[in-house]
Amino acid sequence: MTTASTWIESRRPGVATALQQFGMLGFWVQLVFLIIVALLGGYTFSVTGGTNSRAGLANLLSFLVLAIPVFTTFWCRRYASTGKSMAAGSDGPTPAGLKRRLWTGTWAGIIGAVASLLSLFGAASALLFTMLANPQIGIQVSPGPGTPSSYTISAIDGVSIMSLLLTLTAELLVVAISLRLIFLTERASTRNTPA
C-alpha cells in the first residue's frame, strides 16, 4: 500500500511565502558571510604568501570547507524560486518532492556544520599547543632570535578561526531554515492512502 501526499490548498500559499522569505534570508546571509570569508581568505593568503607555512596550510584547509556553504547558498536561492513559482500558481513540487529538496538542504547544512566544527577543533588545538609550548609568561607575537617560528601566534590564526565561525553560523542557519520549512510543508500536506 502506497501513500501519496497532496497540498491542503488553504495552507499552500503560506508554504510558498515561507519558502520565498526563508530562502532569500538564507541566501543573503550566507552570501554576505561568504564575501567576508573570501575577503579574510584573500588577506590571509596575501600576508602568508600561500601555503609556505604551517598557518598557510591550515588556512587553506579551512577555506576548502567553503565548498559546502557555496552549495547551500544557492540551494536557499532554489527554495525562494520554488516558493515564487508556487505563489504564481504553477503546480510546483508535491509535498513529498518539496520535503526531499528541504532534506537535501538540511543534510548539506549539517555536513557543512560538522566540517566547520572539525576545522575549528583543529585550529583551536593548534593554537592551544602553540600556547602550551611557549613559556607561560606570555605569547610571542614574532619569533625572537633562536626561537623556532612554528611557536608563534599571529593575527592570521584569528582570521582563520573567525572565517570558520562565520561558515558554521551560516550552515546552522540553513539547517534551522530547512527544518522550519519541512515542518510547514508537513502541516500543509495531507496523506492519501489508496484502497
Image: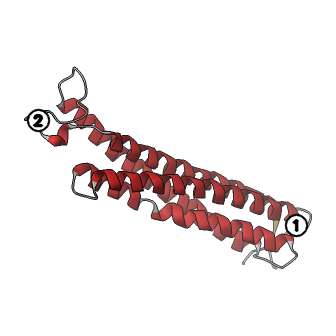
Q: Can residue 108 be spotted in the picture?
A: yes
Q: CA distance from mark 2 to mark 1?
A: 70 Å
Q: Is residue 68 above or below residue 89?
A: above
Residue 79 left/right relative to 158: right
Residue shown at 34%/55% (left/top)?
46
Residue 116: percent from the left, percent from the top?
44, 52
Which picture quadrant has residue 75? bottom right
Residue, far left = 146
- The answer to which quarter of the image holds residue 14 is bottom right
* Crowd around label 1: few <14 · some 14–19 · many ≥20 (10 Å): some
Would you call the spot at circle 2 few (<14 residues within 10 Å), some (14-19), or many (20 or more)? few
Q: Residue at x 90, y 68 (%)?
A: 9
Q: Position of residue 161 (x, y in %)?
A: 40, 44
**Quadrant location, the C terminus:** bottom right
Which structural element holds mark 2? Answer: loop
**In the drawing, what numbered circle is on residue 137?**
none
Q: Quadrant of residue 49?
A: bottom left
Viewer-side residue, 121 vs 81 = 81
State the residue position of label 1: 8
Q: Amino acid at mark 2?
A: Thr
Q: Secondary structure at mark 1?
A: loop
Which amino acid, mark 1?
A: Ile
Residue carrying label 2: 147
Q: Is residue 32 left or right of residue 24?
A: left
> Which comes sooner in the sequence, label 2 or label 1?
1
Q: Residue at x 21, y 22 (%)?
A: 136
Q: Is 5 placed left or right of 97 in the picture?
A: right
Q: Where does residue 94 sit, x and y in percent of width and height?
A: 76, 75
Q: Residue 155 or 63: which is nearer the viewer?
A: 155
